[in-house]
Amino acid sequence: MSTFLHTMVRIRDIDRSLAFYKLLGMKELRRKEVREGRYTLVFIGFDDNEHGQAEIELTYNWDQESDYEVGTGFGHFAIGVPDVAALVETVRTGGGKVTREAGPLKFGTIIIAFVEDPDGYKIELIEKK
């Protein structure tokens, strides 16, 4: 059986990215520094149990001098949360960027919102009660 493991995104600032994802309820699961390759991998998720959940791999390249261009083919991450409106306020209060306020999906009833991480990656918040 195949299992979805993680999605990798390149970041510019580990501390800034971790602070943002913490607002969404995620935490650092493990970290690996590769001195020879001059990069750091930080895996984040919602559960202490690393197995059986999808994770985000934040890749920090030590020598990257300019911002990355978010790919034109990338859409967004989607995270199921119990209260979208409350999490949007947590993100806003924590200094995060809200790009779509909490509300029903166009032509539907599911409550969604969009926020953006410090590197410009979009995260869709979907209400799952």
Image (cartoon, helix red, strand yellow):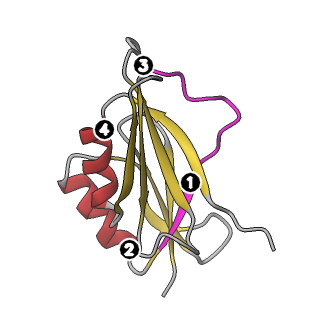
Secondary structure, mark 2, is: loop
Q: Residues within 10 Å of mark 4 (few under 14, many from 20)?
A: some
Q: Is residue 5 magenta?
A: no
Q: Depth check: 105 or 119 in front?
A: 119
- Between disc 3 and disc 4, the foreground one is 4
The image quadrant where one finds the N terminus is: bottom right
Which residue appears at 40% of the width and 44% of the height? 32
Indicate the quadrant where residue 41 lies: top left
Q: Depth check: 69 or 8 in front?
A: 8
Secondary structure, mark 4, is: helix
Q: Compute the Cα span from label 2 to label 1.
A: 20 Å
Indicate the quadrant where residue 30 lies: bottom left
**Residue under label 1:** 77
Secondary structure, mark 3, is: loop
- Between disc 3 and disc 2, the foreground one is 2
Horizontal and vertical percent position of residue 97: 33, 44
Please name the amino acid that badge 1 sits on: Phe
